[in-house]
Image: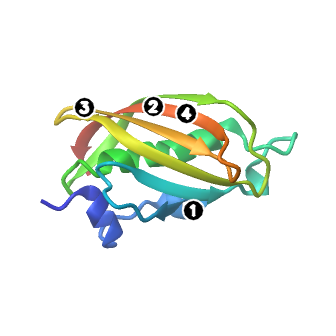
């Protein structure tokens, strides 16, 4: 079985929002253990204090939650996000280099539970998120 993540790596599945926002996948040994993405915070997505707007950080977390689920789904299924929680622990200024590492906690046939940790270039924890996805045809 080819997973949705493998189809993405082979170019048969695209993630347009990731391309638009600049989320870049990082090679990992086993995507069923961990998925990773990096992102440089764009200044145009920051708030008036010069820090990344929280909803944009949530979008980054969502991308990694979805990818973590995709590593456990067949190519013809899509991980539809049903629920997500994010805790933002510190601000991320423009041009900060963020790394998100996600994994599936429970990858069932009807529901997937995933989590992600986002760190900055200093290794400090910026945010933690968890999500629930439901496999759907896509």
Secondary structure at badge 1 equals helix
> Which residue has dot 2 on it?
130
Disc nearer the start of the sequence (1/2): 1
> Which residue has dot 4 on it?
128
Circle 1 Cα neighbour tier, 10 Å, few/some/many (<14 / 14–19 / ≥20): few
Q: CA distance from mark 1 to mark 2?
A: 23 Å
Q: CA distance from mark 3 to mark 1?
A: 28 Å
Q: Quadrant of residue 132?
A: top left
Look at the image and tell me whether residue 32 can be seen.
yes
In the displayed structure, 98 sits above or below 112; it is: below
Circle 4 Cα neighbour tier, 10 Å, few/some/many (<14 / 14–19 / ≥20): many
> Which residue has dot 1 on it?
20
Query: Among all residues in the image, which is located at the extreme right?
Result: 49
Secondary structure at badge 2 equals strand
Residue drawn at (61%, 35%), measured in percent from left and top? 127
Disc nearer the start of the sequence (3/4): 3
Q: CA distance from mark 2 to mark 3?
A: 13 Å
The quadrant the N terminus occupies is bottom left
In the displayed structure, 34 sits above or below 112; it is: below
């Amino acid at each position: 079985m080819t997973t949705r993540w493998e189809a993405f790596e082979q170019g048969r599945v695209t993630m347009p929002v990731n391309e638009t926002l600049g989320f870049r996948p990082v090679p990992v040994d086993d995507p069923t253990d961990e998925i990773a993405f990096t992102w440089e915070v764009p200044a145009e997505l920051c708030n008036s204090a010069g820090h990344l707007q929280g909803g944009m950080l949530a979008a980054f977390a969502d991308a990694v939650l979805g990818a973590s689920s995709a590593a456990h789904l067949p190519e013809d299924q899509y991980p539809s996000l049903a629920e997500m929680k994010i805790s933002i622990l510190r601000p991320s200024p423009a041009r900060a280099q963020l790394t998100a590492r996600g994994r599936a906690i429970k990858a069932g046939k009807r529901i997937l539970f995933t989590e992600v940790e986002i760190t900055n270039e200093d290794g400090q924890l910026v945010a933690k998120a968890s999500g629930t996805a439901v496999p759907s045809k896509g």
